[in-house]
Image (cartoon, helix red, strand yellow):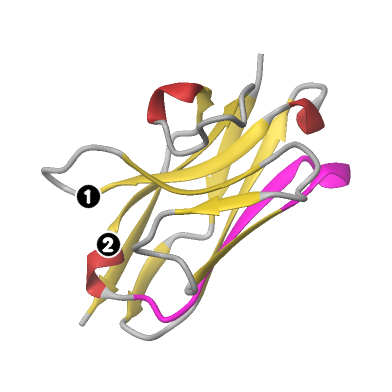
Amino acid sequence: QVQLVESGGGFVQAGISLKLSCVASGRAFSAYVMAWLRQAPGKEREFVAGIEYLGTRTAYADTVKGRFTISRLNAKNTVYLQMNSLKSEDTAVYYCAAGRRWDAPATVTNYDYWGQGTQVTVSS
């Protein structure tokens, strides 16, 4: 069992940077693929970024590639999402998720554990 708690969301203007954090409880954090996903009002939940067990491989949605960076610190059971050059279309609830498989990191159903989410609102 893994419990995930996100933090770092907020209300920012377009072009500003924001960094999200997600702390996991439980053992064997490094045994999990970690990801950030988001859900905007009226839209389906979508993949944003994923990172494999030791952090040597990452994956990004095309919409955030070059602007967002995912990283993890296994010693602190924490995964981060650095978001630069934020746009109004990045407005969503951002969820941290954990799963066992890296073969399809962008597949939402790959993830077994989810946090409660943190709201990010970007004003243009």
Residue at the image point whose x is 31% and y is 83% from the top: 14
The part of the chain drawn in magenta is 72-86
Numbered label attached to residue 40: 1
Numbered label attached to residue 91: 2
Question: Badge 2: few (under 14), some or many (20 or more) residues near its Cα, within 10 Å?
Answer: many
Up/down of 85 relative to 51, above or below: below
Q: The residue tagged with tag 2: helix, strand or loop?
A: loop
N-terminal of the two: label 2 or label 1?
1
Q: Amino acid at mark 2?
A: Thr
Indicate the quadrant where residue 31 lies: top right
Residue 91 magenta: no
Up/down of 9 relative to 117, above or below: below
Residue 100 at what x, y percent from top left? 64, 21
Numbered label attached to residue 93: none
Q: Amino acid at mark 1?
A: Ala
Residue 80 at what x, y percent from top left? 63, 55
Determine the residue located farthest toward the bottom in the rendered image: 15
Residue 59 at what x, y percent from top left? 55, 51
Up/down of 120 relative to 52, above or below: below
Report, in whole angstroms, how far the alpha carbon at label 2 lies from the one at label 1: 6 Å
Q: The residue tagged with tag 1: helix, strand or loop?
A: loop
Residue sitting nearer the eye, 123 or 111: 111
Determine the residue located farthest toward the top in the rendered image: 1
Residue sitting nearer the eye, 82 or 65: 65
Residue sitting nearer the eye, 68 or 7: 68
Q: In the rendered view, does 67 fall on the left or right side of 3?
A: left
